Image (tube, grey):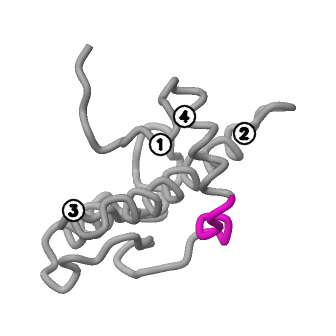
Amino acid sequence: MLTGSYSGGQAYCQSKLAQIMFTLDLADELAGTGVTATALHPATYMPAKIVARPVSTLQSGVDATLRLMIDPSLEGITGRYYNGQHEARADPQAYDPAARSRLRALSDQLTGLTPGQPRTSSTRS
């Protein structure tokens, strides 16, 4: 967590790492239910108002996303990270159970969830 200074680039990278870490935890939590959890980096610097020099096309991001949704060869595949249309390795910290546990504890604290409370059920106030 950024506490000493702020860097937009660092904050962005940390948020993406946290999403991947949560995806791996969610895949473990949902194992055997038929629900899959997969992390995807669809494309690099797709054209948008904040991207001055795109590297990828919007279509490449759409294609990568659709592939995870409809490719029959990926049915039942869970807890994976994809960079575009290729399975890839995320930052090593994403696969560190202790780091994921610390992230989950911090997330519980910041969101007010009770540790161990299922994140897959909905609650109404």
Residue 118: image location, x then y, percent: 36, 42
Residue 106 magenta: no
Mark closer to the observer (2, 1): 1
For mark 4, what is the residue?
Answer: 108
User: Looking at numbered disc 1 in the image, what kind of residue is underneath it?
Assistant: Gly
**The magenta stretch spans which residues?**
91-98
Circle 2: is it few (<14), some (14-19), or many (20+) Cα within 10 Å? Answer: few
In the drawing, what numbered circle is on residue 116?
1
Give the image location of residue 28, x and y in percent.
40, 65
Q: Which residue is mark 3?
A: 35
**At 54% from the left edge and 34% from the top edge, which residue is drawn?**
108
Say which label, 3 or 1, has the lower sequence index.
Answer: 3
Answer with left or right where residue 86 lies relative to residue 63.
Answer: right
Mark 3 Cα shell of 10 Å, populated few (<14), some (14-19), many (≥20): some
Q: CA distance from mark 4 to mark 2?
A: 14 Å
Residue receiving disc 2: 1
31 vs 116, left or right, is left
Mark 4 Cα shell of 10 Å, populated few (<14), some (14-19), many (≥20)? some
